[in-house]
């Protein structure tokens, strides 16, 4: 395995990679980074989830002259989600060197993007339609670009963007360095490479099957407004010894953690805004068993070595297959059994299929549990605890109290009361969560071409280019223990992010 420290990277980039929790390069990173640093054009064939963003992001950040306020790097992506994701990762890679990356895409106010462009980002990540819009308005000039990356080129071909890409590339100096990444290499992509690249090096990475025989993988199709209640029901049914709940954002982690505490669970959050001292404290508490649940973002959980994790819950579906593998790999270690559960919105099913395809694993569908099932799970946990105490046998000091009680009440009633006290009954305390962004990515047939005039790039369909969020729910329903809805409750229930 190749370490980043062996690739001749600058101290600033190595520090950033360490903060991100990465020490070892993936195969595509190990092969791509030296070639890109040497100035070679490159044709990379790799599936999503192999680490290709860092493969081109690291050499790009290395080559940026921070004191030069012009755009020096351009990355073209097929969808707005990928543009945002790539920009976020490059900002993390460039955090120590202070390299600034800006995403531009349809659906976001162009005036806002123009204001951000005036702050002189070093790298721009954009979708074809919106990039062309900025070029026409002269709000972005590409004459100073030294490196261009085409990410998911076959996806852009399928979405009808090739002519747009050619038009954009004519605006960039011919002396540039060009890197093209694609999962497949159809003839049109090869023709594009021949036209715009100079003697490109070829790097091809085959996705390896991820074998995790000790981990049972499941998914539940859940609407965003249902997620939190479903999570609580699962915690009551499965009663994990130690669990990690993965959220996509820092704000989401904070809200999920606070909600779990309100409902009586022992939970702590972990994300990048925490101090190192607080982070260490959370990890110590989980390892010692003083908390049962850690809610974390992907980045915060990188590099953690915690044994005994029995369950992983993907509250938000991971953005790529690599993240999925990293997340669920927290359980099922050292030959022990583990369970991984992923919550999926109906519009995220294609993304789940992508994860299955790349990781070559089968993720089984599970039915959403009811309140009655959650209550039964809690009752069974109480029974198990009671039987454990009986087996331990250290109850002599309680014999006389028990005999006195039996003179006044029958044994079944007393045992029922003991189990009632021990059972954690499902808690329906209202929990308020923010709006939740649903990933709508992964369907090659669902894309629309965007001319950059407010329709939006990617797969968000019609609707003026606005991001699709699940609507705010003006009321939430409190359920009784039978699982029936028990009338509207006036408490804003917003979708969790």
Image: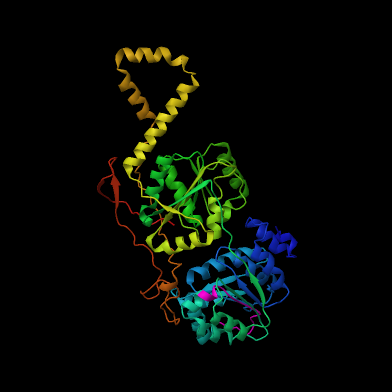
Q: Taking the image as drawn, is residue 216 in sight?
A: yes
Which residue is at the front of the view, 333 or 473? 333
Against 127, residue 432 (above or below) is above
Which residue is at the front of the view, 362 or 53? 362
Q: Give the residue at x 43% y 69%.
A: 443
Residue 233, by quadrant, is top left
Q: Measured from the top left, where is residue 178 in percent x and y?
A: 64, 79
Residue 353, by quadrant, is bottom left
Q: Measured from the top left, where is residue 486 in percent x and y?
A: 25, 46
Query: Which region shows up in magenta?
Result: 140-154
Which color scheme does this rendered protein use? Answer: rainbow
Locate the C terminus and report the quarter of the image it occupies. bottom left
Q: Measured from the top left, where is residue 11 in percent x and y?
A: 73, 62
- Residue 212 inside the magenta-drawn segment: no
Q: Taking the image as drawn, is residue 272 in sight?
A: no
Against 333, residue 391 (above or below) is above
255 displayed left or right of 199: left
Locate the N terminus and report the quarter of the image it occupies. bottom right
Q: Give the residue at x 46% y 81%.
A: 160
Magenta stretch: dominant secondary structure = loop
401 displayed left or right of 123: left
Q: Give the residue at x 57% y 37%.
A: 288
Q: Measured from the top left, where is residue 226 in percent x and y?
A: 36, 52
Q: Give the residue at x 47% y 26%.
A: 388
- Residue 150 inside the magenta-drawn segment: yes
């Amino acid at each position: 395995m190749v370490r980043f420290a062996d690739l001749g990277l600058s101290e600033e980039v190595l520090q950033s990679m360490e903060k991100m929790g990465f020490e070892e390069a993936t195969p595509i990173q190990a092969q791509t980074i030296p070639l890109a640093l040497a100035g070679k054009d490159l044709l990379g064939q790799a599936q999503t989830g192999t680490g290709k963003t860092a493969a081109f992001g690291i050499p790009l950040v290395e080559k940026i002259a921070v004191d030069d306020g012009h755009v020096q790097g351009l990355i073209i992506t097929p969808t707005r989600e990928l543009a945002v994701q790539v920009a976020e990762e490059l900002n993390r890679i460039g955090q120590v060197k202070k390299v600034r990356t800006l995403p531009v895409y349809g659906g976001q106010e162009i005036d806002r993007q123009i204001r951000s462009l005036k702050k002189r980002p070093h790298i721009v990540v954009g979708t074809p339609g919106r990039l062309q819009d900025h070029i026409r308005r002269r709000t972005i000039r590409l004459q100073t670009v030294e490196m261009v990356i085409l990410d998911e080129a076959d996806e852009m071909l399928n979405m009808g963007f090739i002519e747009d890409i050619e038009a954009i590339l004519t605006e960039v100096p011919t002396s540039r360095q060009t890197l093209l990444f694609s999962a497949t290499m159809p003839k049109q992509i090869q023709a594009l490479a021949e036209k715009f690249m100079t003697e490109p090096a070829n790097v091809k990475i085959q996705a390896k099957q991820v074998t995790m025989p000790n981990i049972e993988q499941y998914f539940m199709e859940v609407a965003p407004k249902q997620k939190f209640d479903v999570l609580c029901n699962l915690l009551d049914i499965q009663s994990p010894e130690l669990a990690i709940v993965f959220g996509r954002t820092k704000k989401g982690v904070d809200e999920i953690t606070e909600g779990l505490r309100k409902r009586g669970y022992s939970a702590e959050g972990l994300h990048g805004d925490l101090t190192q001292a607080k982070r260490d404290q959370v990890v110590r508490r989980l390892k010692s068993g003083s908390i049962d649940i850690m809610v974390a973002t992907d980045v915060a959980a990188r590099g953690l070595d915690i044994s005994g994790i029995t369950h992983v819950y993907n509250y938000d579906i991971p953005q790529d297959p690599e993240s999925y593998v990293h997340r669920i790999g927290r359980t099922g270690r050292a030959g022990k059994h583990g369970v991984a559960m992923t919550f999926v919105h109906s519009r995220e099913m294609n993304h789940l299929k992508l994860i299955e395809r790349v990781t070559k694993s089968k993720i089984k569908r599970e039915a959403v549990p009811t309140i009655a099932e959650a209550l039964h799970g809690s009752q069974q946990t109480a029974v198990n605890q009671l039987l454990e105490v009986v087996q331990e046998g250290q109850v002599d000091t309680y014999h006389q109290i028990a005999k006195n009680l039996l003179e006044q009440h029958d044994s079944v009633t007393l045992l029922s009361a003991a189990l009632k006290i021990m059972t954690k009954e499902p808690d329906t305390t209202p929990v308020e969560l923010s709006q939740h962004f649903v990933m709508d990515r992964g369907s090659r047939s669902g894309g629309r071409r965007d001319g950059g005039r407010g329709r939006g790039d990617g797969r968000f369909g019609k609707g003026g280019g606005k991001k699709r969020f699940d609507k705010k729910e003006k009321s939430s329903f409190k359920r009784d223990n039978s699982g029936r809805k028990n009338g509207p409750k006036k408490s804003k229930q917003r979708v969790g992010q």
